[in-house]
Image (cartoon, rainbow, N blue to C red):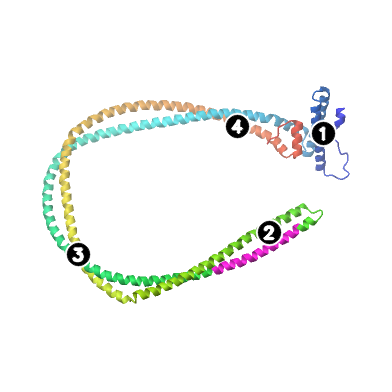
């Protein structure tokens, strides 16, 4: 009864209208989907009646066979090939998931091992650095012992040699003090001459500076007029350019508005047709939107150009005002200072040069005397320093004699301790090297296991790929039927 209510999938015994084969497939698949929808409802309806439920399930098996035939005919594959791909889709993903789980576990182990290796390497590097430091310390202590022993030998030589240096330095200091007194008297005389010459040169230069200041004012006035004139010219050019831009933008906006009106007429004419083509309307609407956007952009350009013209006109007015002010300032300065020629300034400069020559001569004599005083002061300081150093060296050497002997004994004790520490640290390095080798061996083993599992996963992925490619090539309806009739999870 149930089977009769469902019946087999209707077939098309003939094709009187010459329907393309692919459309026939689509019709049959749609009929399969409708039949499957009925079966699902019947399964739910008869779920408590085993006899009727068995009949419904038998009908569902018939749908699977019909769908298998359609796929086989449409994609030129045998039923066994398609069923093999169905089996792959059911079994291989689970195998891959199991392998991935194993790899994740091993990778977790590998991470721990790698951390151990890194820790071993860090500890070993630190221990090796400690040994290197111990060796450097031992070498340093050997060098210190040799150096301190040499220092002890040199101290007695220093004490003897610097006694004669103290006597010679005392004689040099007395001679320097007498020469410095004479040089200070000469310096005082030359300083008085410099003061007189400086005053004369300052008076002459003041007259030159006053005349030059007036000439500078006149030069500044002319420069201001030149700059203002250039500003007026530049502002006029800017205004002309802004007006040209406004004119071209206005014309472009007018053309764009005409294009918008034309495109609107096209859209209206299409809509007026009783059976218009939606594609034609879409293209016409797209052209209308594009032309409206261009018109909007050009309108913004016109507004911007109008603003630029206003700004340029304001700048031209400002430049003209600046030029007028510069011209007025020039007239005012001529009225205030009168005419001063370059010849007048030249005469004043000649007088200033003569005064400066006298000043330079006096300054040279003063500088020479200053140099002599400074040189003698430096020499006195040098000789006094030499005397103090020689006296200090003798006292320091005498104080260092006992300390040097104690230092040699301390160096010998420290050297013995450093050698013992070096041996202990070398033992630690050997232990850490053994631990690192063991962890690296374990790391190699786990990496090989992961590589083997990765190979297995790649093999299964390759085995599954034909089924995935086949499903990807199915239509949405075929994918739905494939999933429901064969009870498989399609790849995402």
Q: Nearer the viewer, mark 4 or mark 1?
A: 1
Neighbor class of circle 1 (other Cα within 10 Å; few <14, some 14-19, many 20+) is some
Nearer the observer: mark 1 or 3; the answer is 3
Give me the C-alpha separation between circle 2 and circle 4: 58 Å
Q: CA distance from mark 1 to mark 2?
A: 52 Å
Q: Residue at x 23, y 34 (%)?
A: 148
Tell me how far mark 4 sits from mark 1, CA to CA: 44 Å
Q: Is residue 260 magenta?
A: yes
* 368 on left or right of 58: left
Res 157 → quadrant: top left
CA gap, disc 1 and disc 3: 126 Å
Earlier-in-chain disc, 2 versus 4: 2
Name the disc covering residue 291, or none: 2
On residue 454, which mark appears? 4
**Residue corresponding to mark 1:** 35
Residue 136, numbered circle: none
Element class at badge 2: helix
Residue 368 in the image, given as x and y percentages of width and height: 18, 61
Q: Residue 76's spot in the image, x, y percent?
A: 78, 38
Q: Nearer the viewer, mark 1 or mark 2?
A: 2
**Would residue 175 be seen by someone viewing this image from the given angle?**
yes
Main secondary structure type of the part rendered in magenta: helix
Measured in 3D between alpha carbons, the distance from the residue under mark 4 to the one under mark 3, in whole angstroms, is 99 Å
Taking the spot 48% from the left edge, 26% from the top edge, the residue there is 438
Looking at the rendering, which quadrant does residue 247 occupy? bottom right
Instruction: State which mark lies toward you, 2 or 4.
Output: 2
């Amino acid at each position: 009864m149930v089977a009769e209510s469902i019946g087999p999938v209707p077939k098309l015994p003939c094709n009187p209208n010459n329907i393309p084969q692919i459309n026939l497939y689509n019709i049959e698949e749609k009929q399969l989907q409708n039949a499957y929808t009925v079966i699902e409802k019947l399964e739910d309806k008869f779920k408590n009646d085993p006899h009727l439920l068995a009949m419904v399930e038998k009908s569902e098996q018939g749908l699977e066979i019909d769908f298998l035939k359609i796929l086989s005919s449409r994609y030129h594959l045998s039923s066994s090939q398609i069923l093999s791909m169905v089996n792959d889709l059911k079994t291989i993903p689970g195998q891959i998931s199991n392998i991935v789980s194993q790899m994740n576990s091993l990778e977790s182990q590998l991470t721990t091992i790698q951390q151990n290796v890194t820790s071993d390497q860090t500890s070993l590097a630190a221990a090796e650095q400690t040994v290197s430091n111990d060796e450097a310390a031992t070498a340093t202590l050997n060098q210190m012992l040799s150096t301190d022993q040499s220092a002890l030998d040199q101290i007695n030589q220093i004490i003897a040699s610097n006694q004669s240096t103290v006597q010679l330095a005392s004689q040099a200091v007395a001679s320097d003090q007498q020469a410095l007194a004479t040089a200070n008297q000469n310096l005082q005389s030359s300083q008085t001459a410099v003061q007189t010459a400086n005053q004369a040169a300052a008076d002459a230069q003041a007259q030159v500076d006053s005349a030059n200041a007036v000439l500078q004012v006149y030069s500044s006035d002319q420069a201001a007029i030149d700059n203002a004139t250039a500003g007026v010219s530049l502002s006029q050019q800017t205004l002309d350019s802004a007006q040209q831009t406004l004119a071209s933008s206005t014309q472009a906006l007018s053309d764009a508005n005409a294009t918008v009106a034309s495109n609107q007429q096209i859209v209206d004419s299409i809509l007026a047709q009783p059976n218009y083509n939606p594609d034609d309307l879409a293209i016409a609407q797209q052209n209308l939107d594009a032309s409206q956007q261009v018109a909007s952009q050009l309108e913004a350009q016109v507004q911007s150009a109008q603003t630029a013209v206003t700004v340029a006109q304001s700048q031209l007015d400002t430049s003209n005002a600046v030029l007028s002010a510069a011209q007025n300032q020039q007239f005012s300065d001529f009225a205030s200072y009168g005419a001063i020629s370059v010849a007048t300034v030249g005469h004043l400069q000649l007088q200033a040069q003569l005064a400066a020559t006298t000043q330079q001569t006096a300054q040279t004599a003063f500088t020479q005397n200053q140099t002599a005083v400074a040189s003698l002061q430096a020499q006195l300081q040098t000789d006094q320093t030499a005397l103090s150093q020689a006296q200090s060296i003798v006292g320091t050497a005498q104080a260092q004699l006992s300390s040097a002997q104690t230092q040699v004994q301390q160096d010998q004790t420290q050297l013995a301790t450093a050698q013992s520490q070096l041996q202990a640290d070398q033992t630690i390095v050997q232990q850490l090297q053994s631990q690192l080798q063991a962890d690296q061996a374990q790391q190699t083993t786990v990496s090989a296991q992961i590589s083997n599992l990765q190979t297995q996963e790649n093999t299964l992925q390759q085995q599954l790929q034909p089924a995935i490619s086949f499903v990807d090539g199915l239509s949405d309806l075929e994918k739905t039927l494939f999933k429901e009739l064969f009870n498989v999870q399609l790849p995402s």
